[in-house]
Image: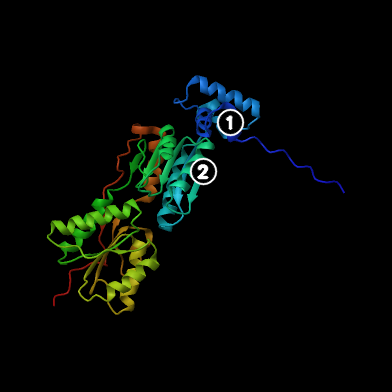
Amino acid sequence: MTEGVERPRQPSMADVARTAGVSAQTVSRALRGSPNVNPDTRRRVLAAVEQTGYRFNSAARALSSGRSHTLGLVLLASGGYYSRSAVTAGVEAAAGEAGYAVNIATIAALDTGLMERSLSKLADQGVDGFVIAVPLISVTPKMEDITRDIPTVTLDGSRTAGARVLGIDQQEAGRIATQHLLDLGHRQVWHVSGPDEWIEARQRRQGWQECLTAAGIEPPPVLEGDWSPDSGLRQGQIIAMIPEVTAVFVASDEMAFGVIRALRERGRSVPEDVSIVSVDDIALAAYCSPSLTTVRQDFYRYGAAAVALLLHGDEAGVDQPAGTASLSVRDSTAPPRRS
């Protein structure tokens, strides 16, 4: 029986970096043809590539042609299946029409270390641009470093110095939703927020607070969910036990579905007893019972617009933000009952 022969390990970018005496990130920039790498360093990197025998594939194509014709999309695994799917579809459709492929990195949690690794991985693949749909509130120097060299658009997510931001004004979305309920005659509006570590959740909550304060109303305690219908159900069970609640602003459609179910199970009808307004206007919002009044976000269009902005810059004619907050009024809101 012949023993197997162990195959030699293929040289890595780290090997090139050690040989050239630079960082792996500098190697990645040099192989992408970044203008921020001085000619001396680039020559050392290319010499190290030849010396180590590193196969740089897509990066080599980018070096020879100036572009890899690949975009990187970074997503969060949690936080709304429908919005994530719509963003992905919009990015892939627009990229495909322009002759680009899309490499997707999905991170499991809101963690800067995971974000850094995802960006580094995509950068090593030679992507020509990033679309970031991850709502980190803070960014790290490494994230700033990577996105400084590679064009980046964020969709209401991580703000780096060089990134351009697309999406609606989330603070305005909170104000519009809350004002709608006040205009119907409700004297108080409760709020089921998204997770505090999400920038969109903070901004929507801020808009709700500002709207109530401007009306001379003290905001009640915030009930925090995690964007899931189940968390909406749990917070809705609390709301159902507070008789004086007549109006609730829920930070997402999916949580609103859970709130409505909880109210119904406790014998409180929507909108006769409690009016519900939310944010997103996903496809199911118009078909639930009652149909949901919600602030619209066109995730598919934002994904496509992000690609246009990456590929064509200001000539793409994309406004920043890409849309204004608009309310789709349906059956889940009504004036309060007269006692």
Q: In which quarter of the view is residue 174 placed? A: bottom left
Distance of label 1 from label 2 (alpha carbons): 27 Å
- Left or right? Give the position of 316 relative to 117: left
The mark tally for this picture is 2
Q: How is the image coloured?
A: rainbow
267 vs 51, nearest the viewer: 51
User: Farthest left residue?
Assistant: 216
Q: Amino acid at mark 2?
A: Asn
**Residue identifier under label 1:** 18
- Left or right? Give the position of 171 relative to 146: left
- Marks 1/2 in contact by CB < 8 Å: the verdict is no
Q: Is residue 193 visible?
A: yes
Q: Is residue 288 visible?
A: no
268 vs 94, nearest the viewer: 268
The relative height of residue 240 versus residue 283 in the rendered view (above or below) is below
Q: In which quarter of the view is residue 227 placed? A: bottom left
Circle 1 packing at 10 Å, graded few (<14), some (14-19), many (20+), is some
